[in-house]
Amino acid sequence: MYSVSDFRKGLPIIVDDQPYYVVEYQHFKMGRGKANIRTKLKHIKTGSVVEKVFASNDSFKPPDIERRKMQYLYENGGEFAFMDSETFEQIAVPVDSLGDGKWYLLENEEYVLMFLDGVALTVDLPASVILEVVETEPSARGDTVSNVTKPATMQTGLIVKVPPFVKEGDKLKVDTRSGEYLERAN
């Protein structure tokens, strides 16, 4: 059971017998009453977003989500192919289910996929991934003003704002939650 103090972005919960993800949440208190939590919830199956308000003492059950480790194989026409490493069963996950997670998938790497009622929902990504820069403009001599950035295209097609010293072929650590550059990888 989850309480409202457990809320975080991406937390799966059951509300009115339906599975949702927490998209946003905000604690607020008006006057002398109890604190309430204003939330935006995204339906796991349909993708519709609803706004709900909960009392601070409400509790929620987690949905019965199965997690399976699968290897990402390739992308084909808007579907991403994954293979179970133990049974060699292959499944296709639509790009809509992955959302921005598609920019962080590397071929032949293993990821944890989340399933609800036998249907693949999304991929559970690590906090950061290491991607290679395939295209970026060279830095101009004298560009040393603080906080200068330039766009860099990563091997997956993701465009990241990077410092001027980054060049093509560099491997960078990128935050999967915000899509921001963290540091150069060794």
Image: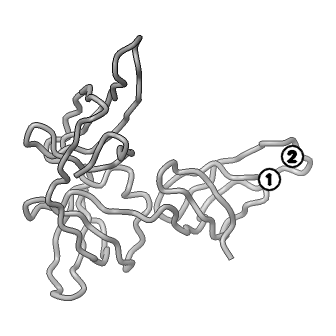
Colour basis: one colour
Instruction: State the quadrant of the C terminus.
Output: bottom right
Q: Residue furthest front?
A: 32
Measuring 22% from the left and 47% from the top, which residue is drawn there? 13
Residue type highlighted by circle 1: Ser
Task: From the viewer's side, name the closer residue of 8 and 48.
Answer: 8
Residue beneath label 2, please?
143
Residue toward you, 19 or 135: 19
Identified at 35% across, 77% down, the residue is: 110
| In the image, residue 186 above or below residue 116 | below
**Snapshot quadrant of residue 50:** top left
Q: Residue at x 26, y 45 (%)?
A: 21
Counting from the top left corner in percent of width and height, residue 153 is at 57, 56
Q: Position of residue 120 (x, y in %)?
A: 17, 62
Position of residue 182 measured from the top left corner of the image (x, y, whole percent): 64, 58
Q: Residue at x 38, y 56 (%)?
A: 101
Binning the other alpha carbons within 10 Å of mark 1 as few (below 14), some (14 to 19) or many (20 upward) gives: some
Pick whichever, 164 or 139, lies toward us: 164
Q: Does the residue at mark 2 contact the one at mark 1 (Cβ under 8 Å)?
A: yes
Q: Secondary structure at mark 1?
A: loop
Instruction: Give the vertical position of 58 relative to 136 (above or below).
Output: above
Q: Quadrant of residue 36?
A: top left
Image side of residue 133 versus residue 61, left or right: right
Residue ranking furthest to the top = 31
Q: Vertically, is 120 above or below 8?
A: below
103 relative to 167 in the view: left or right: left
Q: Which mark is residue 139?
A: 1
Point out residue 144 in the picture as x, y percentages from the top left corner.
88, 47
**Amino acid beneath label 2:** Asp
Give residue 20's quadrant in the image. top left
Name above or below for residue 54 compared with residue 8: above
